[in-house]
């Protein structure tokens, strides 16, 4: 069984919702990412999204764009991230999902990319700029290796498109809470319940909400209607601010007095613990 399916089944049996943590690989270094992933898994993250830094993103907001810029400047590559994923798989069984764009996948070769990802222990792929109508070849390659291809549904998706997304998605459906790019917001999107109900008409897959989850409060609100939440920008902001030695502001934050990789990891871990505790209530 794919690890993504296994985790959602376990959570369902326990009556819990999923917490998916997105991190930008290589920000500030791959060594940092490699240490952080097991810590986040041990602290309550049920699944981990490994963000592949990309220079021309269409879905990433300013926070993730800055992280990608730092990672690319540090020399991170797809091959290095795949090697890291393979090493991570020796340390943790948390489901690993690669979030990337289609160009690197196309350049690597669809079959070759999926094969390398599967051999590295990657369980799923999210490719925001891959239209569901053009995903047939990649989906065949992914299905062959039991790697789940996860599609995004947005509030602007038509019923016909939602039906197609629900039909082709495996593992869960990534429900974009707002039109636009990633980024923390103070409140959950108006109309989230109705949006999720529309998707629910077409699938029994778990529905996980991303884009706009900023902390324990917004996560708690989202899981009233969803099966899980995805937190990315807010998590990266905490790492960023800790490394810069800034005092953090916003939901669920505590002032930071010191800076450095250890403090950044501690801040990220505490943030994940706080959100996990919130969605259990």
Image (cartoon, helix red, strand yellow):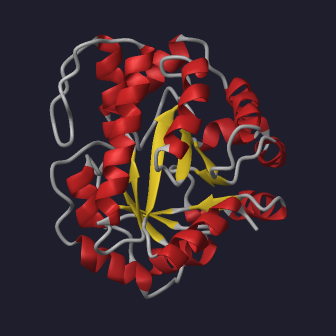
At 44% from the left and 18% from the top, the residue drawn is 262
Task: Say above or below: 211 vs 29.
Answer: below
Name the residue at 64% across, 68% down: 5
Residue at point 41%, 79% (across, down)? 199
Image vertical order of residue 102 relative to residue 160, above or below = above
Q: Is residue 257 left or right of residue 16?
A: left
Percent of width and height locating residue 251 = 17, 42
Q: Which residue lies furthest to the bottom in this view?
A: 201
Horizontal side of 232 relative to 52 (left or right) equals left
Q: Quadrant of the N terminus?
A: bottom right
Q: Is residue 23 visible?
A: yes
Q: Position of residue 32 (x, y in %)?
A: 54, 21
Q: In which quarter of the image is the C terminus?
A: bottom left
Q: Position of residue 184 (x, y in %)?
A: 25, 43
What percent of the width, then of the height, locates residue 279?
33, 62
At horizontal 71% and vertical 37% (from top left) the residue drawn is 91
Is residue 178 visible in the rendered image? The answer is no
Q: From what the image shows, is residue 110 above or below residue 249?
A: below
How many numbered marks does the figure carry?
Answer: 0
In this view, 48 is above or below 167: above
Asked where in the image residue 245 lies, by quadrant, the reply is top left
State the image quarter where residue 140 is shown: bottom right
């Amino acid at each position: 069984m794919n690890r993504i399916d296994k985790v959602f089944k376990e959570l369902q049996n326990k009556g819990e919702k999923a917490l998916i943590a997105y991190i930008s690989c290589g920000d500030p270094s791959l060594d940092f990412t490699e240490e952080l992933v097991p810590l986040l898994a041990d602290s309550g993250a049920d699944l981990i999204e490994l963000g592949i830094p990309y220079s021309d993103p269409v879905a990433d907001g300013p926070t993730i764009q800055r992280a990608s810029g730092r990672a690319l400047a540090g020399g991170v590559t797809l091959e290095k991230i795949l090697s890291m994923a393979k090493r991570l798989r020796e340390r943790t069984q948390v489901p690993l999902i690669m979030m990337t764009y289609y160009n690197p996948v196309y350049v690597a070769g669809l079959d070759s990319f999926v094969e390398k990802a599967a051999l590295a222990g990657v369980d799923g792929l999210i490719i925001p700029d891959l239209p569901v109508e053009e995903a047939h070849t990649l989906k065949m390659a992914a299905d062959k290796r039991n790697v789940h291809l996860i599609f995004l549904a947005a509030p602007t998706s038509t019923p016909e498109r939602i039906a197609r997304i629900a039909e082709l998605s495996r593992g869960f459906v990534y429900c974009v809470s707002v039109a636009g790019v990633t980024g923390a917001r103070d409140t959950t999107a108006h109309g989230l319940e109705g949006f999720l109900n529309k998707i629910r008409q077409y699938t029994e897959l778990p529905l996980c909400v991303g884009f706009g989850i900023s902390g324990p409060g917004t996560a708690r609100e989202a899981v009233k209607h969803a099966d899980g939440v995805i937190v990315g920008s807010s998590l990266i902001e905490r790492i960023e601010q800790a490394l810069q030695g800034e005092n953090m502001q916003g939901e669920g934050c505590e002032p930071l007095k010191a800076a450095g990789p250890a403090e950044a990891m501690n801040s990220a871990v505490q943030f994940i613990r706080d959100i996990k505790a919130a969605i259990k209530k």
